[in-house]
Amino acid sequence: MLEKVDLSRKLGKDEYRQSVKELGARLGELQRRQREAGIPVMVVFEGWEGSGKGAQMNQLILPLDPRGFRVQNITDSFMSDPFYPAMYPFWRAIPPAGRMSIYNRSWYRKAIELWRAPEESGQGEMEKKLEEIRSFERQLVDGGYLLIKLFLHIDRSEQKKRLQRLKSDETKGARGQEELNAYKNYDDILPVLEEVIRETDRAHSPWTIVEAHDRRFATVKVLSVVARALENRLNQPKIETVKEPVVLSELEEAVTTPTVLSKVDLSLEPDDSYKKEMSSLQRRIRRMEYALYRDRRPMVVAFEGWDAAGKGGCIKRLTQEMDPRGYEVIPVGAPNDFERRHHYLWRFWQDFPKAGHVAIFDRTWYGRVLVERVEGLCSPLEWKRAYSEINDMEKQWHVSGAIVMKFWLQIDKDEQLRRFQSREETPEKKWKITEEDWRNREKWDLYEKAVEEMLWRTSTPYAPWAIVEANSKDYARLKVLRTVLSMGEEALGGVR
Protein backbone atom coordinates (compact mmCIF):
# COMPACT_ATOMS: atom_id res chain seq x y z
CA MET A 1 0.00 0.00 0.00
CA LEU A 2 2.53 2.64 1.13
CA GLU A 3 5.09 1.44 -1.41
CA LYS A 4 2.70 2.41 -4.21
CA VAL A 5 2.40 6.05 -3.10
CA ASP A 6 3.91 8.50 -5.61
CA LEU A 7 6.57 10.31 -3.58
CA SER A 8 7.89 12.31 -6.52
CA ARG A 9 5.16 14.95 -6.33
CA LYS A 10 6.48 18.50 -5.97
CA LEU A 11 5.29 22.07 -5.87
CA GLY A 12 7.02 25.18 -7.19
CA LYS A 13 7.78 28.15 -4.96
CA ASP A 14 5.31 30.54 -6.55
CA GLU A 15 2.45 28.07 -6.52
CA TYR A 16 3.32 27.12 -2.95
CA ARG A 17 3.28 30.73 -1.71
CA GLN A 18 -0.01 31.51 -3.35
CA SER A 19 -1.60 28.30 -2.10
CA VAL A 20 -0.41 28.80 1.48
CA LYS A 21 -1.68 32.38 1.49
CA GLU A 22 -5.13 31.37 0.26
CA LEU A 23 -5.37 28.30 2.50
CA GLY A 24 -4.24 30.28 5.55
CA ALA A 25 -7.04 32.82 5.13
CA ARG A 26 -9.53 30.02 4.52
CA LEU A 27 -8.43 28.09 7.62
CA GLY A 28 -8.67 31.16 9.84
CA GLU A 29 -12.27 31.72 8.73
CA LEU A 30 -13.15 28.04 9.08
CA GLN A 31 -11.74 27.93 12.61
CA ARG A 32 -13.94 30.86 13.62
CA ARG A 33 -16.99 29.12 12.18
CA GLN A 34 -16.00 25.84 13.84
CA ARG A 35 -15.82 27.54 17.24
CA GLU A 36 -19.19 29.21 16.76
CA ALA A 37 -20.75 25.92 15.70
CA GLY A 38 -19.33 24.16 18.77
CA ILE A 39 -17.63 21.37 16.79
CA PRO A 40 -14.76 19.62 18.61
CA VAL A 41 -11.89 18.81 16.23
CA MET A 42 -8.98 16.39 16.58
CA VAL A 43 -6.12 16.46 14.04
CA VAL A 44 -3.68 13.54 14.27
CA PHE A 45 -0.16 13.66 12.84
CA GLU A 46 1.48 10.26 12.43
CA GLY A 47 4.35 9.27 10.15
CA TRP A 48 7.90 8.05 9.84
CA GLU A 49 10.68 9.45 11.98
CA GLY A 50 12.11 12.39 10.09
CA SER A 51 9.01 12.83 7.89
CA GLY A 52 8.44 16.39 9.10
CA LYS A 53 5.50 16.07 11.48
CA GLY A 54 6.67 18.96 13.65
CA ALA A 55 7.24 21.25 10.68
CA GLN A 56 3.82 20.47 9.20
CA MET A 57 2.10 21.03 12.53
CA ASN A 58 3.74 24.43 12.73
CA GLN A 59 2.51 25.29 9.24
CA LEU A 60 -1.03 24.27 10.22
CA ILE A 61 -1.22 26.36 13.37
CA LEU A 62 0.28 29.55 11.88
CA PRO A 63 -3.03 30.85 10.48
CA LEU A 64 -5.08 29.68 13.48
CA ASP A 65 -6.17 31.63 16.54
CA PRO A 66 -4.05 30.15 19.37
CA ARG A 67 -6.96 30.59 21.78
CA GLY A 68 -8.88 27.94 19.86
CA PHE A 69 -6.45 25.03 19.73
CA ARG A 70 -4.06 23.00 21.82
CA VAL A 71 -1.05 20.99 20.64
CA GLN A 72 -0.71 17.68 22.45
CA ASN A 73 2.71 16.04 22.26
CA ILE A 74 2.30 12.30 22.89
CA THR A 75 5.48 11.37 24.75
CA ASP A 76 6.44 8.26 26.68
CA SER A 77 5.52 10.01 29.93
CA PHE A 78 2.06 10.86 28.55
CA MET A 79 1.31 7.18 27.94
CA SER A 80 3.52 5.40 30.43
CA ASP A 81 1.41 5.37 33.60
CA PRO A 82 0.90 1.64 34.20
CA PHE A 83 -1.84 2.28 36.75
CA TYR A 84 -4.51 3.21 34.19
CA PRO A 85 -6.01 1.67 31.01
CA ALA A 86 -4.25 2.38 27.73
CA MET A 87 -6.91 4.78 26.43
CA TYR A 88 -7.31 6.63 29.75
CA PRO A 89 -4.93 9.55 28.95
CA PHE A 90 -6.48 10.03 25.52
CA TRP A 91 -10.05 10.17 26.84
CA ARG A 92 -8.92 12.76 29.36
CA ALA A 93 -7.26 14.83 26.61
CA ILE A 94 -10.15 15.10 24.16
CA PRO A 95 -11.15 18.71 23.42
CA PRO A 96 -14.47 20.27 24.43
CA ALA A 97 -16.99 21.55 21.90
CA GLY A 98 -15.63 24.36 19.73
CA ARG A 99 -11.99 23.59 20.45
CA MET A 100 -9.29 21.88 18.37
CA SER A 101 -6.60 19.49 19.56
CA ILE A 102 -3.59 18.76 17.36
CA TYR A 103 -1.69 15.59 18.20
CA ASN A 104 1.99 15.01 17.53
CA ARG A 105 1.64 11.23 17.45
CA SER A 106 -1.37 9.70 19.10
CA TRP A 107 -3.13 6.60 20.41
CA TYR A 108 -1.52 4.76 17.47
CA ARG A 109 1.92 4.92 19.02
CA LYS A 110 1.62 1.77 21.15
CA ALA A 111 0.22 -0.24 18.24
CA ILE A 112 3.01 0.85 15.90
CA GLU A 113 5.67 0.00 18.47
CA LEU A 114 4.47 -3.62 18.52
CA TRP A 115 6.78 -4.32 15.58
CA ARG A 116 9.35 -5.16 18.23
CA ALA A 117 7.17 -7.84 19.89
CA PRO A 118 7.48 -11.57 19.10
CA GLU A 119 5.22 -12.46 16.20
CA GLU A 120 2.76 -14.67 18.10
CA SER A 121 2.23 -12.44 21.13
CA GLY A 122 2.56 -9.29 19.04
CA GLN A 123 -0.34 -10.25 16.77
CA GLY A 124 -2.66 -10.79 19.72
CA GLU A 125 -1.67 -7.47 21.24
CA MET A 126 -2.07 -5.77 17.88
CA GLU A 127 -5.65 -7.02 17.49
CA LYS A 128 -6.50 -5.80 20.99
CA LYS A 129 -4.95 -2.37 20.39
CA LEU A 130 -6.68 -1.91 17.04
CA GLU A 131 -10.06 -2.83 18.51
CA GLU A 132 -9.55 -0.27 21.30
CA ILE A 133 -8.64 2.35 18.72
CA ARG A 134 -11.61 1.60 16.47
CA SER A 135 -13.97 1.76 19.44
CA PHE A 136 -12.44 5.06 20.65
CA GLU A 137 -12.66 6.73 17.24
CA ARG A 138 -16.13 5.44 16.50
CA GLN A 139 -17.47 6.76 19.81
CA LEU A 140 -15.87 10.16 19.28
CA VAL A 141 -17.22 10.59 15.75
CA ASP A 142 -20.67 9.36 16.77
CA GLY A 143 -20.51 11.89 19.60
CA GLY A 144 -19.98 14.79 17.20
CA TYR A 145 -16.19 14.99 16.94
CA LEU A 146 -14.42 15.74 13.66
CA LEU A 147 -11.40 13.43 13.44
CA ILE A 148 -8.69 14.14 10.83
CA LYS A 149 -5.85 11.59 10.55
CA LEU A 150 -2.70 12.37 8.57
CA PHE A 151 0.18 9.99 7.87
CA LEU A 152 3.36 11.60 6.54
CA HIS A 153 5.11 9.13 4.25
CA ILE A 154 8.73 9.06 3.05
CA ASP A 155 10.81 6.19 1.71
CA ARG A 156 13.79 4.57 3.42
CA SER A 157 16.52 6.46 1.62
CA GLU A 158 14.88 9.83 2.26
CA GLN A 159 14.48 8.95 5.92
CA LYS A 160 18.18 8.09 6.17
CA LYS A 161 19.21 11.45 4.67
CA ARG A 162 16.94 13.39 7.00
CA LEU A 163 18.06 11.55 10.11
CA GLN A 164 21.70 12.12 9.20
CA ARG A 165 20.98 15.84 8.93
CA LEU A 166 19.21 15.62 12.26
CA LYS A 167 22.29 14.09 13.87
CA SER A 168 24.51 16.87 12.57
CA ASP A 169 22.14 19.53 13.93
CA GLU A 170 23.54 20.31 17.38
CA THR A 171 20.26 21.95 18.43
CA LYS A 172 18.55 18.54 18.32
CA GLY A 173 20.88 17.02 20.90
CA ALA A 174 20.48 13.38 21.91
CA ARG A 175 17.30 12.99 19.89
CA GLY A 176 19.25 12.91 16.63
CA GLN A 177 21.66 10.31 17.99
CA GLU A 178 18.83 8.03 19.09
CA GLU A 179 16.89 8.25 15.83
CA LEU A 180 19.76 8.04 13.35
CA ASN A 181 19.45 4.24 13.12
CA ALA A 182 15.65 4.25 12.82
CA TYR A 183 15.89 3.81 9.06
CA LYS A 184 17.53 0.40 9.62
CA ASN A 185 14.18 -0.86 10.94
CA TYR A 186 12.20 0.66 8.07
CA ASP A 187 11.46 -2.66 6.38
CA ASP A 188 10.36 -4.24 9.67
CA ILE A 189 8.05 -1.40 10.58
CA LEU A 190 6.51 -1.00 7.12
CA PRO A 191 4.12 -4.02 7.27
CA VAL A 192 3.02 -3.03 10.79
CA LEU A 193 2.19 0.48 9.64
CA GLU A 194 0.27 -0.85 6.66
CA GLU A 195 -1.78 -3.15 8.90
CA VAL A 196 -2.52 -0.35 11.36
CA ILE A 197 -3.63 2.03 8.60
CA ARG A 198 -5.66 -0.62 6.77
CA GLU A 199 -7.47 -1.84 9.91
CA THR A 200 -8.34 1.66 11.18
CA ASP A 201 -9.23 3.35 7.89
CA ARG A 202 -12.99 3.82 8.22
CA ALA A 203 -15.52 6.04 6.49
CA HIS A 204 -16.05 8.02 9.68
CA SER A 205 -12.31 8.39 10.39
CA PRO A 206 -10.29 7.88 7.19
CA TRP A 207 -6.53 8.16 6.84
CA THR A 208 -4.92 10.66 4.48
CA ILE A 209 -1.46 9.69 3.24
CA VAL A 210 0.69 12.80 2.79
CA GLU A 211 3.54 12.51 0.28
CA ALA A 212 6.23 14.19 2.35
CA HIS A 213 9.41 14.13 0.22
CA ASP A 214 8.73 17.66 -0.96
CA ARG A 215 7.93 19.79 2.07
CA ARG A 216 6.08 22.40 0.05
CA PHE A 217 3.80 19.79 -1.48
CA ALA A 218 3.23 18.20 1.96
CA THR A 219 2.34 21.54 3.54
CA VAL A 220 -0.24 22.41 0.91
CA LYS A 221 -1.77 18.95 1.12
CA VAL A 222 -2.03 19.07 4.91
CA LEU A 223 -3.64 22.52 4.88
CA SER A 224 -5.98 21.50 2.05
CA VAL A 225 -7.11 18.30 3.79
CA VAL A 226 -7.82 20.06 7.09
CA ALA A 227 -9.63 22.93 5.37
CA ARG A 228 -11.73 20.58 3.27
CA ALA A 229 -12.67 18.45 6.29
CA LEU A 230 -13.73 21.53 8.26
CA GLU A 231 -15.65 22.92 5.33
CA ASN A 232 -17.47 19.66 4.64
CA ARG A 233 -18.47 19.34 8.27
CA LEU A 234 -19.65 22.94 8.56
CA ASN A 235 -21.65 22.65 5.33
CA GLN A 236 -23.46 19.51 6.40
CA PRO A 237 -27.15 20.17 6.96
CA LYS A 238 -27.84 20.27 10.66
CA ILE A 239 -29.99 17.37 11.70
CA GLU A 240 -32.28 18.31 14.54
CA THR A 241 -32.43 15.32 16.84
CA VAL A 242 -35.80 14.68 18.41
CA LYS A 243 -35.51 15.25 22.13
CA GLU A 244 -38.82 14.88 23.84
CA PRO A 245 -40.18 12.63 26.59
CA VAL A 246 -41.24 9.22 25.37
CA VAL A 247 -44.57 7.55 26.08
CA LEU A 248 -45.12 4.06 27.37
CA SER A 249 -46.34 2.67 24.04
CA GLU A 250 -42.99 3.59 22.43
CA LEU A 251 -41.06 1.79 25.14
CA GLU A 252 -43.32 -1.24 25.01
CA GLU A 253 -42.71 -1.47 21.28
CA ALA A 254 -38.93 -1.01 21.64
CA VAL A 255 -38.30 -3.35 24.55
CA THR A 256 -38.17 -7.01 23.59
CA THR A 257 -36.32 -8.19 26.69
CA PRO A 258 -37.28 -10.87 29.16
CA THR A 259 -38.95 -9.36 32.22
CA VAL A 260 -36.69 -9.86 35.21
CA LEU A 261 -37.76 -7.21 37.69
CA SER A 262 -41.22 -8.73 38.15
CA LYS A 263 -39.59 -11.98 39.26
CA VAL A 264 -37.50 -10.41 42.03
CA ASP A 265 -38.52 -11.65 45.48
CA LEU A 266 -38.86 -8.47 47.49
CA SER A 267 -40.03 -10.28 50.62
CA LEU A 268 -36.49 -11.40 51.49
CA GLU A 269 -35.28 -10.41 54.96
CA PRO A 270 -31.99 -10.97 56.80
CA ASP A 271 -31.92 -13.41 59.71
CA ASP A 272 -31.18 -12.49 63.32
CA SER A 273 -27.41 -12.57 62.76
CA TYR A 274 -27.49 -9.37 60.67
CA LYS A 275 -25.19 -7.30 62.90
CA LYS A 276 -22.69 -10.09 63.38
CA GLU A 277 -22.55 -10.88 59.66
CA MET A 278 -22.31 -7.22 58.70
CA SER A 279 -19.33 -6.75 60.99
CA SER A 280 -17.63 -9.84 59.59
CA LEU A 281 -18.22 -8.78 55.98
CA GLN A 282 -16.86 -5.30 56.61
CA ARG A 283 -13.63 -6.68 58.09
CA ARG A 284 -13.21 -8.97 55.07
CA ILE A 285 -13.81 -6.07 52.72
CA ARG A 286 -11.06 -4.11 54.41
CA ARG A 287 -8.67 -7.04 53.87
CA MET A 288 -9.79 -7.27 50.25
CA GLU A 289 -9.11 -3.56 49.80
CA TYR A 290 -5.51 -4.11 50.89
CA ALA A 291 -5.25 -7.11 48.56
CA LEU A 292 -6.42 -4.91 45.68
CA TYR A 293 -3.70 -2.42 46.50
CA ARG A 294 -1.05 -5.12 46.84
CA ASP A 295 -1.98 -6.69 43.49
CA ARG A 296 -2.54 -3.31 41.82
CA ARG A 297 -6.08 -4.16 40.72
CA PRO A 298 -8.56 -1.29 40.31
CA MET A 299 -12.19 -1.88 41.25
CA VAL A 300 -15.29 -0.08 39.98
CA VAL A 301 -18.53 -0.47 41.95
CA ALA A 302 -21.55 1.14 40.28
CA PHE A 303 -24.90 1.75 41.96
CA GLU A 304 -28.18 2.39 40.19
CA GLY A 305 -31.72 1.96 41.47
CA TRP A 306 -35.07 3.56 42.09
CA ASP A 307 -35.23 6.83 43.98
CA ALA A 308 -35.15 6.01 47.73
CA ALA A 309 -34.00 2.44 47.02
CA GLY A 310 -31.17 2.78 49.55
CA LYS A 311 -28.05 3.36 47.46
CA GLY A 312 -26.57 5.74 50.02
CA GLY A 313 -27.09 3.29 52.88
CA CYS A 314 -25.46 0.46 50.96
CA ILE A 315 -22.47 2.64 50.09
CA LYS A 316 -22.12 3.75 53.70
CA ARG A 317 -22.01 0.14 54.96
CA LEU A 318 -19.66 -0.89 52.17
CA THR A 319 -17.11 1.79 53.03
CA GLN A 320 -17.57 1.85 56.81
CA GLU A 321 -14.41 -0.14 57.59
CA MET A 322 -12.46 0.58 54.40
CA ASP A 323 -9.24 2.59 54.43
CA PRO A 324 -10.31 6.04 53.18
CA ARG A 325 -7.02 6.41 51.33
CA GLY A 326 -7.95 3.56 49.01
CA TYR A 327 -11.41 4.49 47.77
CA GLU A 328 -13.49 7.38 46.50
CA VAL A 329 -17.26 7.76 46.30
CA ILE A 330 -18.33 9.66 43.19
CA PRO A 331 -21.86 11.12 43.30
CA VAL A 332 -23.19 11.55 39.77
CA GLY A 333 -25.76 14.17 38.89
CA ALA A 334 -26.78 15.99 35.75
CA PRO A 335 -23.71 17.09 33.74
CA ASN A 336 -22.62 20.70 34.15
CA ASP A 337 -22.07 23.06 31.22
CA PHE A 338 -18.40 22.11 30.77
CA GLU A 339 -19.15 18.37 30.93
CA ARG A 340 -21.88 18.76 28.32
CA ARG A 341 -19.28 20.17 25.92
CA HIS A 342 -17.53 16.78 25.91
CA HIS A 343 -18.51 13.27 24.94
CA TYR A 344 -20.94 12.02 27.60
CA LEU A 345 -18.50 9.28 28.75
CA TRP A 346 -15.62 11.74 29.19
CA ARG A 347 -16.45 12.63 32.78
CA PHE A 348 -16.56 8.97 33.85
CA TRP A 349 -13.12 8.29 32.40
CA GLN A 350 -11.91 11.17 34.57
CA ASP A 351 -12.90 9.25 37.70
CA PHE A 352 -11.58 5.82 36.74
CA PRO A 353 -9.58 4.61 39.77
CA LYS A 354 -5.84 4.26 39.86
CA ALA A 355 -4.66 0.64 39.96
CA GLY A 356 -5.07 -0.68 43.50
CA HIS A 357 -7.89 1.76 44.34
CA VAL A 358 -11.69 1.58 44.38
CA ALA A 359 -14.15 3.97 42.71
CA ILE A 360 -17.74 3.77 43.95
CA PHE A 361 -20.27 5.52 41.71
CA ASP A 362 -23.56 6.70 43.20
CA ARG A 363 -25.44 6.72 39.90
CA THR A 364 -23.49 6.27 36.71
CA TRP A 365 -23.04 6.47 32.94
CA TYR A 366 -26.30 4.53 32.67
CA GLY A 367 -28.14 7.81 32.99
CA ARG A 368 -27.89 7.97 29.18
CA VAL A 369 -30.23 4.95 28.79
CA LEU A 370 -32.42 5.73 31.81
CA VAL A 371 -33.24 9.35 32.73
CA GLU A 372 -31.92 10.86 29.48
CA ARG A 373 -33.88 8.32 27.47
CA VAL A 374 -37.15 8.59 29.38
CA GLU A 375 -37.05 12.37 29.78
CA GLY A 376 -36.09 12.92 26.14
CA LEU A 377 -32.75 14.58 27.00
CA CYS A 378 -31.05 12.69 24.18
CA SER A 379 -32.28 11.35 20.86
CA PRO A 380 -33.30 7.71 20.26
CA LEU A 381 -30.21 7.31 18.07
CA GLU A 382 -28.00 8.45 20.95
CA TRP A 383 -29.43 6.21 23.66
CA LYS A 384 -29.63 3.17 21.37
CA ARG A 385 -25.98 3.65 20.47
CA ALA A 386 -25.07 4.01 24.15
CA TYR A 387 -25.49 0.31 24.96
CA SER A 388 -22.55 -0.74 22.80
CA GLU A 389 -20.53 2.35 23.80
CA ILE A 390 -20.94 1.52 27.47
CA ASN A 391 -20.14 -2.15 26.92
CA ASP A 392 -16.99 -1.16 25.04
CA MET A 393 -15.88 1.16 27.85
CA GLU A 394 -16.47 -1.45 30.55
CA LYS A 395 -14.67 -4.09 28.48
CA GLN A 396 -11.62 -1.84 28.15
CA TRP A 397 -11.65 -1.35 31.91
CA HIS A 398 -11.86 -5.12 32.43
CA VAL A 399 -9.06 -5.84 29.96
CA SER A 400 -6.84 -3.37 31.81
CA GLY A 401 -7.30 -5.44 34.98
CA ALA A 402 -10.24 -3.68 36.62
CA ILE A 403 -12.90 -5.56 38.56
CA VAL A 404 -16.22 -4.05 37.45
CA MET A 405 -19.49 -4.75 39.24
CA LYS A 406 -22.88 -3.06 38.95
CA PHE A 407 -25.85 -3.08 41.32
CA TRP A 408 -29.50 -2.35 40.56
CA LEU A 409 -31.44 -1.78 43.80
CA GLN A 410 -35.01 -2.94 43.29
CA ILE A 411 -37.97 -1.88 45.43
CA ASP A 412 -41.68 -1.91 44.64
CA LYS A 413 -43.85 1.13 44.14
CA ASP A 414 -45.57 0.86 47.53
CA GLU A 415 -42.24 0.71 49.37
CA GLN A 416 -41.01 3.76 47.50
CA LEU A 417 -44.15 5.67 48.51
CA ARG A 418 -43.61 4.76 52.16
CA ARG A 419 -40.02 5.98 52.01
CA PHE A 420 -40.97 9.21 50.25
CA GLN A 421 -43.61 9.96 52.90
CA SER A 422 -41.18 9.09 55.71
CA ARG A 423 -38.63 11.51 54.31
CA GLU A 424 -41.18 14.31 54.13
CA GLU A 425 -42.23 13.69 57.74
CA THR A 426 -38.67 13.47 59.15
CA PRO A 427 -37.00 16.90 59.47
CA GLU A 428 -33.43 15.59 59.16
CA LYS A 429 -34.34 13.61 56.03
CA LYS A 430 -36.62 16.10 54.32
CA TRP A 431 -33.76 17.38 52.14
CA LYS A 432 -33.62 13.97 50.45
CA ILE A 433 -37.04 14.35 48.80
CA THR A 434 -37.64 16.75 45.90
CA GLU A 435 -40.35 17.59 43.43
CA GLU A 436 -38.30 15.76 40.81
CA ASP A 437 -38.57 12.54 42.84
CA TRP A 438 -42.36 12.76 42.80
CA ARG A 439 -42.38 13.60 39.11
CA ASN A 440 -40.16 10.63 38.30
CA ARG A 441 -42.44 8.38 40.33
CA GLU A 442 -45.30 9.23 37.98
CA LYS A 443 -43.23 7.69 35.17
CA TRP A 444 -42.55 4.44 37.02
CA ASP A 445 -43.76 2.23 34.17
CA LEU A 446 -41.61 4.09 31.65
CA TYR A 447 -38.52 3.75 33.79
CA GLU A 448 -39.22 0.10 34.51
CA LYS A 449 -39.19 -0.72 30.79
CA ALA A 450 -35.96 1.23 30.32
CA VAL A 451 -34.35 -0.59 33.26
CA GLU A 452 -35.35 -3.99 31.85
CA GLU A 453 -33.67 -3.22 28.54
CA MET A 454 -30.58 -1.78 30.25
CA LEU A 455 -30.11 -4.92 32.34
CA TRP A 456 -30.58 -7.17 29.34
CA ARG A 457 -28.25 -5.33 26.97
CA THR A 458 -25.41 -4.44 29.34
CA SER A 459 -25.00 -7.36 31.75
CA THR A 460 -21.81 -8.99 30.51
CA PRO A 461 -19.36 -11.57 31.88
CA TYR A 462 -16.81 -8.81 32.45
CA ALA A 463 -19.25 -6.30 34.01
CA PRO A 464 -22.35 -8.14 35.30
CA TRP A 465 -25.41 -6.59 36.88
CA ALA A 466 -26.51 -7.81 40.31
CA ILE A 467 -30.15 -7.17 41.12
CA VAL A 468 -30.53 -6.40 44.82
CA GLU A 469 -33.84 -7.10 46.57
CA ALA A 470 -34.06 -3.82 48.49
CA ASN A 471 -37.50 -3.62 50.16
CA SER A 472 -35.55 -4.67 53.24
CA LYS A 473 -32.68 -2.24 53.68
CA ASP A 474 -30.75 -4.65 55.88
CA TYR A 475 -31.05 -7.49 53.37
CA ALA A 476 -29.93 -5.20 50.54
CA ARG A 477 -26.88 -4.03 52.47
CA LEU A 478 -25.80 -7.58 53.25
CA LYS A 479 -26.29 -8.69 49.64
CA VAL A 480 -24.20 -5.83 48.29
CA LEU A 481 -21.33 -6.61 50.65
CA ARG A 482 -21.52 -10.34 49.96
CA THR A 483 -21.47 -9.72 46.22
CA VAL A 484 -18.56 -7.28 46.35
CA LEU A 485 -16.58 -9.82 48.38
CA SER A 486 -17.52 -12.76 46.19
CA MET A 487 -16.55 -11.03 42.94
CA GLY A 488 -13.49 -9.34 44.39
CA GLU A 489 -12.06 -12.41 46.07
CA GLU A 490 -12.70 -14.55 42.99
CA ALA A 491 -10.89 -12.04 40.75
CA LEU A 492 -8.00 -11.87 43.21
CA GLY A 493 -7.75 -15.64 43.56
CA GLY A 494 -8.70 -15.41 47.21
CA VAL A 495 -7.61 -12.86 49.79
CA ARG A 496 -4.51 -13.78 51.70
Image (cartoon, rainbow, N blue to C red):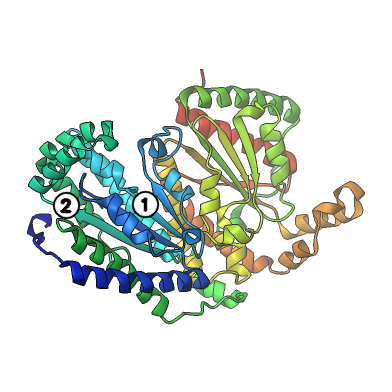
Q: Is residue 336 left or right of residue 161?
A: right
Q: Secondary structure at mark 2?
A: helix
Image coords of residue 10 (percent x, y): 13, 64
- If the image is split into quadrants, where does the N terminus sit? bottom left
Q: Residue at x 74, y 43 (%)?
A: 473
Earlier in the chain: of badge 2 and badge 1, it is 1
Q: Is 27 or 81 nearer to us in this picture?
A: 27
84 or 251, which lies in front? 84
**Where residue 363 sits in the image (x, y, percent)?**
63, 51
- Which kind of residue does numbered mark 1 sit on? Tyr
C-alpha gap between disc 2 and disc 1: 20 Å
Q: Provide the residue designation for mark 1.
A: 103
Q: In the shown orientation, is residue 385 left or right of residue 130?
A: right
User: Which residue lies at the image location 75% right of the left edge and 28% below the top edge?
Assistant: 275
* The quarter of the displayed image where residue 277 is located: top right
Mark 1, secondary structure of its residue: strand
Q: Identify the residue at image location x=33%, y=62%.
A: 148
Q: Which mark is residue 194?
A: 2
